[in-house]
Image (cartoon, rainbow, N blue to C red):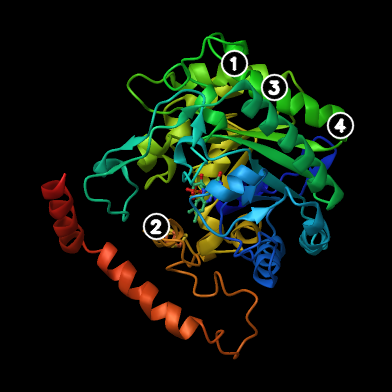
Amino acid sequence: MLPEKIADILSAPFKINKLTLANRLVMGPMAVGAPTAEGAPSEQTIAFFERRARGGIGMIIAGGVVATARSFEETPFKPVLRFDVESLIPQFRRVADTVHAHGVPIIAEIMPGFGRMGVPGPGRPIISASPINVVIPEQNFPKGVLVPGGRTTPEPDEATVEEIEQYRREMVDTASNVQRAGWDGVEVAAHMSYFASSFLSPRTNWRTDQYGGSVENRARMLTNIVRNIRERLGPDFVIGLRITANDYMPDGQGAAGFSAIAKEVEKAGLDYVALSTGCYETMDRSAPSVDGGLVDTGDARLFRNALSVPLLLQGLHDPARAAEAIADGHGDMVMLARPMLADPDYARKACSGRTDDIVHCTRDNLCMRRLVFNMPVRCSVNPAMGRESRKSGSLPPARRFIEAPVEKAILALTGSRRFMGLVGAVIKRRS
Ligand SMILES: Cc1cc2nc3c(=O)[nH]c(=O)nc-3n(C[C@H](O)[C@H](O)[C@H](O)COP(=O)(O)O)c2cc1C
Ligand code: SF4
């Protein structure tokens, strides 16, 4: 496809509820905002989002945001933004004002709980729809992420009805904080192997109460959350849903089952659905090394046919493939996550026919490895990423002179097949 044609398709404005997006490219949620340890946006958080808004992206979905006290305590990634604390609203308002100054809407992806991927603490077990843990085989980690012997998480407790209800109340209160901070909407996180997603498939939901069994029951927690947010915050506040399109598990439910759930939740008042691929067990599908999964498998098409609301695709780094997918009706917009780390000006370039100038993400997943080790996220091809707030010519903060070499050593060792092979052999011998 010619660059001019790509630009024509991608630069077409689009409406979500009352918002008008300048183009069809959306920044996908990523926990890369470098908030403070208390969960407040830092100067770096603001500078990171400002840079992407300045680069012409149509809408920003902020990731790494927790909506409940429990999710703040059990998060496997630190630090995270905390929208459940009212006193932080003025600081979040600064983020919205900065991004809005570029005419770009901003949505918070809100996480009720990390469920099967949460970190248990004293007196605080992890909870899920049913007591089934996550087993990630070594070969299913994304490219560049070496975990000898794979990973097996602890078995969660079955969530009680009161715990599910508490999450619902907290999600609605948090959505209200998001609105009061001047943000444009929320995206309910129900993907990967986190708490909400555990309800969606019979593989992870064995309940026999009102939250298990039929599609209506498995969708109930989400429909209640969406309906309550809509009732409390009015018709104009944007509510999205991030959902797994396909878990790719042999005993999973595939895109037909997940799209049936999305259709059920849509009735409660959704404004859009954003797709994610795979789950933690099939994590290589979630951060894929090639373009087009959702489109080539026909999974996006199943969602498109099931839903009336706008559909956001992912996994299309090549602007030609992104434009093609939209032109062919697989979805309405394309979410870019890692490409937004690699090139904050991606959208401006793609929408003005300068596709050759885009700095492409190499999918080496350094960003993800840093996230997994709770290090500040950086990008292999964009040295400015993660340092947007630093004035040019200024020195990094003093603590970085100690932290940076340690991080480098950890990354070198954990990136070495030989070293990780030895670690794997020791673990095997001990178990
Ligand atoms: C560093 C990093 C952090 C991420 N954090 C989140 C997050 O907080 N919430 C979320 O839904 N997805 C998160 N993701 C997943 C992305 O949204 C996206 O699904 C994935 O990277 C694949 O899309 P891409 O090929 O455009 O990168 C993260 C990905 C990366 C690389
Ligand atoms: S570090 Fe940069 S280039 Fe590498 S996968 Fe992440 S975004 Fe892409």
Work out how far the residue at label 4 is from the one at label 2, CA to CA, in angstroms: 40 Å
Within-10-Å neighbours for mark 3: few <14, some 14–19, many 20+: many
Within-10-Å neighbours for mark 2: few <14, some 14–19, many 20+: many
| Quarter of the figure with residue 91 | bottom right
Q: Between disc 2 and disc 3, whose residue precedes? A: 3
Report the residue marked by disc 2.
365
- Taking the view exactly as shown, the residue that stands out farthest to the front is 123
Q: Position of residue 231 (x, y in %)?
A: 85, 27
Work out how far the residue at label 4 is from the one at label 3, CA to CA, in angstroms: 14 Å
Report the residue marked by disc 3.
223
Residue at image point 43% right, 35% down: 279
* CB at disc 2 and ligand 2 closer than 8 Å: yes
Work out how far the residue at label 2 is from the one at label 3, CA to CA, in angstroms: 34 Å
Q: Between disc 2 and disc 1, whose residue precedes? A: 1
Residue 138 left/right relative to 123 = left
Q: Amino acid at mark 3?
A: Thr
Report the residue marked by disc 4.
232
| Quarter of the figure with residue 215 | top right
Residue at image point 44% right, 78% down: 403
Q: Position of residue 51 (x, y in %)?
A: 67, 67
Q: Amino acid at mark 4?
A: Arg
101 shown above or below 289 = below
Viewer-nearest of labels 3 and 1?
Answer: 1
Report the residue marked by disc 1.
211
